[in-house]
Image (spheres, coloured by chain):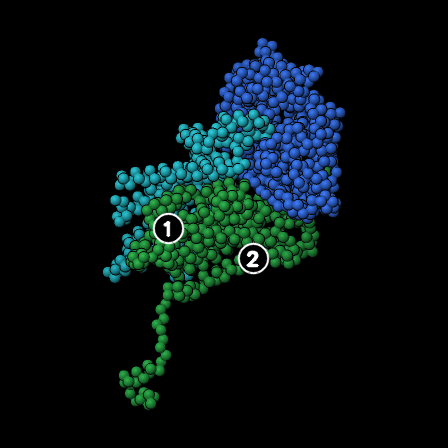
Chain colours: A cyan, B green, C blue
Amino acid sequence: MLNFLVRRTVGAILVIIAVTFIVFVIFIVVPGGDPAQRIAGKNATQQNIVNIRKDWGFDRPFYVQYSKMMQKMFSGELVSYTSQQNVLDQIKLGLPATFSLAIGAGIIWLFFGIVVGVVSAIKAGKLSDRAITVLALIGVSMPVFWLGIVTRYYLAEGGLTTFFPDGEYVAFTSDPLQWFWHLVLPWTVLAVLFIGFYSRVLRGNILDTSNEDYVRTAKAKGLAPNRIMRKHILRLSLIPIITLFGLDFAAVLGGGAILTETVFDLHGVGQYAYESINNFDLPPIMAVTMYAAIFIVVFNVLVDLFYAFLDPRIRPA
Amino acid sequence: MAQQATETEFTLDTAAELAAHEEPEAIRGRSPWYLAWRRLRRNYVAFFFLFVFIVVVVACAFAPVYAKHVAGTGPNTNHILENVKVNGKETPVVSSGGYIDPHTGKLCPTSQSGCKLVASIPIGPTWFGAGGKFVLGADQNGRDIAVRLLYGGRTSLFIGIFSSAICVFFAVILALVAAYYGGWADFTITRFFDVMFAFPVILLGIALGSALAINGFHHFGINIQSGSIWIPTLIISYVLVPYIGRPLRGQVLSLREKEFVEASISQGASPLRVMFIELLPNIASSVIVFFTLIIANNILLETALSFLGAGVQPPTASWGTMIADGQNLIVTRPWLSFAPGLAIIITVVSLNVFGDGLRDALDPRAKVKVSH
Amino acid sequence: MDTGTDYLDPGLSYTVEGWGVMWNVYLPLLGYKHVNGPDGATIVPYLAQDLPKVSSDGKTYTLTLRKGVKYSDGTAVKASDFKASIERDFKIDSPGVGFFGNIVGASEFAKTKTGSISGITADDSTGVITIKLSAPQGDFDNILATEFAALLPSSTPAKDQSTTPAPSTGPYMLQSYTPNKSIVEVRNPNFDASLYGGNVPQGNPDKVVWDVIGDDNVALQRTISGQDQWSSYHPIPPDRLAEVQSKYADQIKLFTPANTYYFFMNTRVAPFNNLKVRQAVNYAINREALVRVYGGLATTTENVLPPTYPQYKKLNLYPYNLAKAKALIAASGDKGMPVTVWNHDRGLDPRTTAYLVPVLNSIGLKAKEKIVNAAVYWTTIGNQATKAQIGFADWFQDYPHPLDWFDVLLNGERITQTHNNNYANFDDASVNSQIDSLKKEPVLDNAANARWATVDKEVMQQAPWAPFLNRQLTDFFYSNVDLSCYVNHVLYEFDYSTICVK
């Protein structure tokens, strides 16, 4: 087990380094992306640009720049090209919104995804199953940003009502009620997508498992259907769901819900990532990429451990 | 002679005589493809949605016809200062703005009292009240939304279909190479997948899209200009390769252990032969299902990237850029954003339902990633 | 407040948002009157006792520091603080150092950043400051009034002080700044309005909190509900204007900041090296259409200078005439030439070139658009290697003086290889010499104004630009704000120091 963990940790670190290096190269290679000129502003002199290049280290070879940037990232001194804001402080500012969005939406989509999946599996083939399937597929087929815009219009800007608040994130510490209120729409919009997807996967898994030999044996032995469902089928069908959830949840925590955060103006880490890329602001891009990669890689390891725990056949040697 | 005998008794002789008159028939084996087709044929819902998808594709393909004969304008022509007759009434395509005197409708010289500050708003849907012009309304540049919707569909469908084809193509090759050769090839390819998986899909898509939009892609002998729709196509196919490649590799890995592969290798079959003649046909059903479902996913991904400005570049219309353009008129002209959104939903739902039916018919285990 | 605040360090900020906050916090030697309208462009002494005494050759400026001025931390303001603040600008690679390049010794100091700028001498005992310029510069007063020239204590570290604000001299001081979150200002306890003879107001609010909001709709909603009392730098979305107008008409104020939106045409590259083609473009665009693209909140223009300037004389050289444009293109011999039209991708600006491209195609050119990320757009078109033929540009003044327009954007002697601001590469000997001669005018009297108007006309006759509109913006207030105190300054826009509540 320890061997496994050590190997995975080393692998994870290598992956994260590779990820940051790739992002760095993408943006260093971009022509017209000379940050010295952008920092210098519109009225700068040539001397000014030369000075900036020297002071910021843009005249060093790219691997030197890369290692310096990584150093600054770990020492907490990394500043962005636009406005020299401290990158880590900005990420910390965005964490509450991103975490609130991820955890709330995650609970909703996991719960409803499982419920809807089980119901449609039990009623497989009947009209209610077909109806649920169509609804789930519609949920999966909606562009999440469009759904966000539409719900904002109808429920917050007056299309039908202005009942809900129109975007923005309110910190839990300042007003818990408003915090909840402002998150209802973003949670729902983000969850709709996953509920559709998870319910279909679970339905498929349950139906597949129901056809396995050992389930048939249990039925033949006279075990009650409910008991079969709970003790055998559900347990096994949920395993892939938990795996998927681990990875999707990690992605949202890591700022992957860029569209939802941007459309609702939540100013979380995802929105910060998008704005930095849009501004060709390399330091925050690096930091956010690393932040996202850490979450994904860590959760990958956790999911593997979870799998090994549940299924002895997969236990690492 | 034989007929007389059957009227009274049935003996082995009569059976032999009857058999001699029958035409010899080969035993019809049912291939899995044929069985799958039969299952699919009975799924009316899947076929209905396939039909819907084909209607969408055909409608978008006929965009120039609609533009010329119904709407009378192209997707990029501006009609800002023109008027149209809607149900007999002359209406400006884009109304004038500034301080307007509500009585005369003309501009006030200064903000004298009684003058209201109004913004220029484009015309809303005319629903054929203007003879086919501006059926779904106009955008802030006075362009016909319905025409742009159809042209935008061409873009989004093109990108969706071609990116899926390219993605699946490379994923299949990588999966086959990794699983067949094992060792270093497998190690490198799996590490490559791992690194790609560590990026949130949208983040990598935006990064590549923004970076390549400036000067295009001029490496490895390929030269693509920055406004070309091949840029988002290639980016999307690249980003999704691991999501197809890894499950396929898993399937090939389990196939590789089967006896028929071992038999083929021991018979001296070359690696290419084993990969493409023995292994590939057995994952073909997965590949087909993946391909169909990933078109749906890629259309969604392209619209997301275009919405964020990292996909299709203006002036090329795409359903994603239309939604972004319509955002700041959502309160007064919701159709600017609704129309492309509904188009996306209809297209993607049809693909998903048909792909679902296809999967039920072929019965492989296919899991596809979705962007959020 | 929108997310445009870059720094709250007067040595670094180069946005209207940063300046709008800081002009009541960090005072330079000279400044502007806190009034509405063109009179707001009048320069008055702030930390200096009087306007500078300029030598007859225009190259020496002498000022005396007011007596008794203190920083917010209680220390006295010294004359040598001015010299230290300018030198600090160079040390921190300020984007404003270009303004001070004319001071003797500045370029040497820029290279080494050691020693001091020889052209500035300050005597702390008498409070006299002397500035020597290499050549006379008519807008030097305006440059002394920029925030880059604001006085900070000599001990202020040579790095960005936005989050650890330096002591202030104005009616307000920065209590805290959380980037992208909020700015909090409180009264400066050591500010004495009586010293300034009315040039700097005491300030009505005791405390000002700016909430940084990204989305225009969110800002509007907060102002309607009273969470914020005014939505600064967030124009009302054109979409909501009708609704806001019907319910809150009295709370809206429309204003015209000094700006011009134009299409530049690169005179070094075909087909725009041909005068006929450039004039054809000017005839071909219907400026009213472009006004509607901006929601109707703009006025058409054919001038370089904005209409709020005293030097503005309305030009009507190119009334809309599509037929004439086509004829000019046909006569130019450049018919059918491929043209790439450049623009960036933010806001409403991309729509202007979506309009322009079909227009160019209709007069006989073969145009297509190229959209570039806004972060790199300006450096891309400012690079000669790009050979950008025609594209979108806009200019918002740095200070209210025609030199900020003609010298920066249209002076042939200031064309550079990269980082160019003269996107049209306009190089007309007559205009260049007029600009150089007007640079020496220390005061903008009627004669100088008339000469500037002539320059405007001469430039437009050569048509390196196709200017099309001056943008208007809105201020929106909560119902408890008394708009009789409303002051919108020609440079700094809405003045929060004068705001009063009912």
Q: Toward which corner of the image does residue A18 lie, by quadrant?
A: top left
Chain on which label 1 sits: B
Pick the residue in front: A296 or A108.
Answer: A296
User: In the image, C27: left or right of B167?
Assistant: right
Of the two numbered discs 1 and 2 in the rendering, the one whose residue sits closer to the viewer: 1
Which residue: 25% across, 44% down? A317
Locate the C terminus of chain C by quadrant.
top right
Q: Secondary structure at mark 2?
A: helix
Q: A274 or B248, which is in the foreground?
A: B248
Q: Which mark is residue C9?
A: none
Name the residue rendered at 53%, 48% in the picture. Answer: B229
Q: Position of residue B320 (x, y in %)?
A: 53, 48
- What is the residue that sits farthest to the top in this orientation? C125
Q: Residue at x 62, y 28 (%)?
A: C398
Mark 2, residue position: B61
Total tally of numbered discs in the picture = 2
Q: Residue furthest left?
A: A221
Q: Is residue B182 left or right of residue C18?
A: left
Give the residue type that dot 2 points to: Ala
Q: Say what amino acid the circle numbered 1 marks.
A: Val
Label 1's element? Answer: helix
Q: Which residue is mark 1?
A: B177
Could you tell me if residue B117 is visible in this image?
A: no
Residue depicted at x 67% and y 20%: C136
Coordinates of residue A7 in the picture (x, y in percent): 31, 39
Give the x, y percent position of residue C345.
Answer: 57, 41
| Residue A307 can be seen in this image | yes
Alpha-carbon neighbours of circle 1 within 10 Å: few (<14), some, or many (≥20)?
Answer: some
